[in-house]
Image (spheres, rainbow, N blue to C red):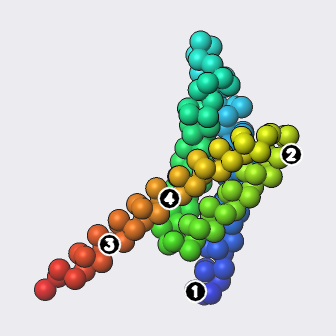
Amino acid sequence: MNKIRNILGWAGIVILGLFNGLLEDLLFLNIIVPYMPPSWDLTGNLFFIFTVPLAQLLTLGITGTLAWFFLGLHQIPRLITFWICWSISRAVVLTLFNNPVEDIVIYLVWIALWCVLIGLLARSKGNRHRNAGTNAV
């Protein structure tokens, strides 16, 4: 049973990582654009410092929460797999929409930043749990 659970966990991490690359555009087009004030220029100067991270955080809020609580995203090998799948998916989607390489790199840097922050959180929580266990008498 543990072997099946482990295989399903890894498959879930891969699927959610790949889905993340698609979900960003869906959330951007269906949530961010219609509900932002028209005075905000979402495609101009704010795009790579506000709009892209916001779409990624919205996506990560959905898939990352599922992966953290149900699939073990706090384990570094699973996080790295999630990051690679998300990056590949995002790069493929952006390439299909004929985005310049420089723009794709910016997206991938943001993805790497979020995954590093998740890794730091996972390590912090892991150290806290390990330290709590050693302090018990």
In front: mark 1 or mark 3?
3
- Seen at 59% across and 26% down, the residue is 46
Q: Secondary structure at mark 3?
A: helix
Quadrant of the image occupied by residue 3: bottom right
Task: Compare marks 1 and 4 and give the one earlier in the sequence.
Answer: 1
Q: Amino acid at mark 2?
A: Leu
Q: Are marks 1 and 3 in contact (CB under 8 Å)?
A: no
The percent position of residue 85, horizontal first and vertical second, equals: 69, 62
Numbered mark located on residue 2 in the image = 1
> Residue at horizontal 56%, vertical 74%?
77
Tell me how far mark 2 sits from mark 4, CA to CA: 27 Å
Q: Position of residue 31 (x, y in %)?
A: 64, 31
Distance of label 3 from label 2 (alpha carbons)? 42 Å
Q: Is residue 23 visible?
A: no
Q: Secondary structure at mark 1?
A: helix
Task: Assess disc 4: are there few (<14), some (14-19) or many (≥20) residues with their C-alpha within 10 Å of its C-alpha.
Answer: some
How far apart are the alpha carbons under marks 1 and 3? Answer: 25 Å
Q: Which mark is residue 127?
A: 3
Q: In the image, 126: left or right of 133?
A: right
* Furthest residue toward top: 39
Q: Is residue 121 left or right of residue 60?
A: left
Q: Are marks 2 and 4 in contact (CB under 8 Å)?
A: no
User: Cα distance, mark 1 to mark 4?
Assistant: 28 Å
| Callout 4: SS | helix
Residue 83 seen in this snapshot? yes
Please tell me the numbered disc located at residue 116.
4
Give the crowd class for mark 2: few <14, some 14-19, many >=20 residues within 10 Å: few
Give percent across and percent down for residue 102.
72, 42
